Amino acid sequence: MSVVGFDFGNESSIVAVARQRGIDVVLNDESKRETPSIVCFGEKQRFIGTAGSASSTMNPKNSISQIKRLIGRQFSDPELQRDLKSLPFNVTEGPDGYPLIHAHYLAEKNLNAAVVDCCIGIPVYFTDLQRRAVLNAAIIAGLQPLHLIHETTATALAYGIYKTDLPENDQLNVAFVDIGHASMQVCIVGFKKGQLKILAHSFDRSLGGRDFDEVLFHHFAVKFKEEYKIDVIQNAKPSIRLRAACEKLKKVLSANPEVPLNIECLMDDKDVRGFIKREEFEQISAPILQRVKRPLEKALADAKLAVEDVHTVEVVGSASRVPAMLKILTEFFGKEPSRTMNSSECVARGCALQCAILSPTFKVRDFQSCRKQQLTALYSPTNLYGFKVNESFPFSISLLWKGSSSDSQNGVEQQQLIFPKGNSIPSVKAVTFYKRSSFSVDVQYSDVSDLQIPPKISTYTIGPFPTIRSERPKLKVKVRLNLHGIVSLESASLLEGEEEVSAKGDTDVKMQDAKGTADVAAVENGVPESGDKPMKMEIDTKVEAPKQKVKKTNIPVAELVYGAMLPADVQKAVEKEFEMALQDRVMEETKDKKNAVEAYVYDMRNKLSDKYHDFVTASEKEELTAKLQETEDWLYEDGEDETKGVYVAKLEELKKQGDPIEERYKEYTERGAVIDKLVYSINSYREAAMSNDPKFDHVELAGKQKVLNECAEAEAWFREKKQQQDQLPKYATPVLLSADVSRKAEALDRMHMPTITSNLSSNRSPAPGESSPAGKRDVPMEVGETID
């Protein structure tokens, strides 16, 4: 089973895998480390990655890319609406209010896909719905995601796990600034030996390299409209070409003060030219650059650190090379940012490391045991120590419900902060309600108005309840924030009677509603958290008391996640992906078979006039050449779009005529070597059998005579066949076959080698092409008859 880390970028993706001797970035079919994040839907198959990027120019409206900004966001989102203007494919509002991408595609049948353990990097700002969407996509693709890890956390893990100079006690604070194609993310991390702690996250969802590309795109689109009277923005293909040219221009501007732009036949057969200086680029990018400081300031504030407390600044991401960005970071932190990591591959490597730690495929060691063995640089996944990652959640999560002491359905609306911002991941909280009938609980974000996302995540209906005899029944609800950062109300248990008293020292956080009645009795931490300070709380320290009998009844919980796929829909998508994957495979195999037919036509035609010339008769050559020409014409006419089976049959038909010719040529070229081997075996065994050397005295006379007889029989067979073969022309079917000669030599070895080999090994004639051993004299071959 593979252990894989995925960095799904808005523009390109990178895959890293844990193998022996370390973490390797996987090369794609084109031997590149980065693969474009694009799928082009053709009429009969999908083109993914580099192939999809190449096909997108000809089929832009069916080429889906840059969906990282679309996933899990409502169609009415203003940011999403701005992004849609730059996308060539058709996106409409779906029935659930979320984007619906349109593409034309045909698919057939079913295919099973391999399942692998993987960790997937996601932006820290992804909402609960977006995280669920990534998980669903991974499942549909046939993957087994162990962890959705924040991209900045993966970068920090890749940075810290191989760093050998981390302090034992004092904390080393590092700021990671990731400016990717789609967004900017900032993470402040505290490092110690064998562990890291996320101190703060911040981000700007729409500040990335793509935004700089768009600035350049609109700058030149307006310029070309004025100078060349062409409207690039209204045409998909020219827009794709201009955006690609602007992206390259941006990269060149990072190293040069001024850059020209030339595009041939951009639109209406017009060649366009442009020019821009770095200063002008920074001026038109000023609105973007002005937003850089805000995430930096917010990260420091949330981490409760001053600029001086940050020891190192690590910059990664494709857009981090823009000089203006580096200038802002240097001025803000008062130090030059470092680039000790591969800015494109660090997320994928960190994901693969985390996957190796989590997956049962690899055995990991705790940090202390590795220190004792002085394993300061652990490059083998089997030696990865358990580097502790203390992750934090970037949002605040609250529970909202209606209720009062009388359990009225129209009771007072109550809200409780359950996972505050910065809460550890994963985490479990137990909430105790006093309820006697069914009720609903909403899970929602707190304080996310600036993110422009819907506050409500999900609604859970708890009930129906059984007949309750207790006057004051307790309902204990378990709420989980899992490893992926997804919140769910996991279970509800009705407790009647007196609950067992906790051990001395355990605490409950008692909550009072607006009227002072205890509708929610407690919020308990399943995992100890620092900084959890709910409003209006009292701390009760329990003391040991006699245990009482408690009746525990599980209460049904129904989940409704707003905008998420239903399990049945996920299963349908899995089946649909199987169908499309099979269709892709069938089309690839069909293309391979078609190419095989075409290659055979050209190859055989050349060989008939070259090395096969003497091995084919004039009539055979004429007939086969005509057949090859007929097949070539068919390939480019009626056979342009046939099925795999038709191409296989066509190739077999050609080979029926071509294979005998190839076999004659092959026999001629290989026959000499196998004949030399047989002659050597006959001469060697005959020499040993007729030798008077004392070292062969152990072989009985009858045994020697048997060897001589077998050698004579083999020699007679060979002489007869060779004489027949020498009389035949090269284009005739051979009578002396290499396979038959090899079998004769092998038969002699099986019969006589156990008897004689041990004596021949120290003093024997060398085999063809073999030199005599140093200090030894070759055994004379005149003893007995030899064959040449």
Image: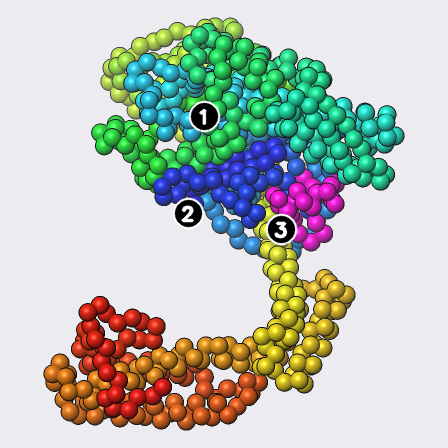
| Residue pointed to by mark 1 | 340
- Under circle 1, the secondary element is loop
Dot 1 or dot 2, earlier in sequence? 2
Asked if the residue under mark 2 is in contact with the one under mark 1, i.e. CB atoms within 8 Å, the reply is no
> Which percent across, then down, holds residue 336?
49, 15
Magenta residues, as a range? 42-64
Q: Is residue 748 above or below residue 150?
A: below
| Residue pointed to by mark 3 | 580
- Real-space Cα separation, disc 1 to disc 2, in angstroms: 31 Å
Dot 2 or dot 3, earlier in sequence? 2
> Which percent across, then down, holds residue 391?
43, 23
Q: Is residue 480 left or right of residue 598?
A: left
Residue 50 within the segment the image draws in magenta: yes
Q: Quadrant of residue 375?
A: top left
Three-letter amino acid code of the residue under disc 3: Met
| Residue pointed to by mark 2 | 1
> Which percent across, then down, holds residue 447?
57, 13
- Real-space Cα separation, disc 3 to disc 1, in angstroms: 41 Å
10 Å neighbourhood of mark 1: few (<14), some, or many (≥20)? few
Residue 773 within the segment the image draws in magenta: no
Q: Is residue 226 left or right of residue 349?
A: right
> Which percent across, then down, holds residue 161?
37, 28
Q: Is residue 601 above or below residue 738?
A: above
- Real-space Cα separation, disc 2 to disc 3, in angstroms: 24 Å
- Mark nearest the camera among 3 and 1 is 1
Dot 3 or dot 1, earlier in sequence? 1
For image coordinates 39% across by 82% down, the residue present is 675
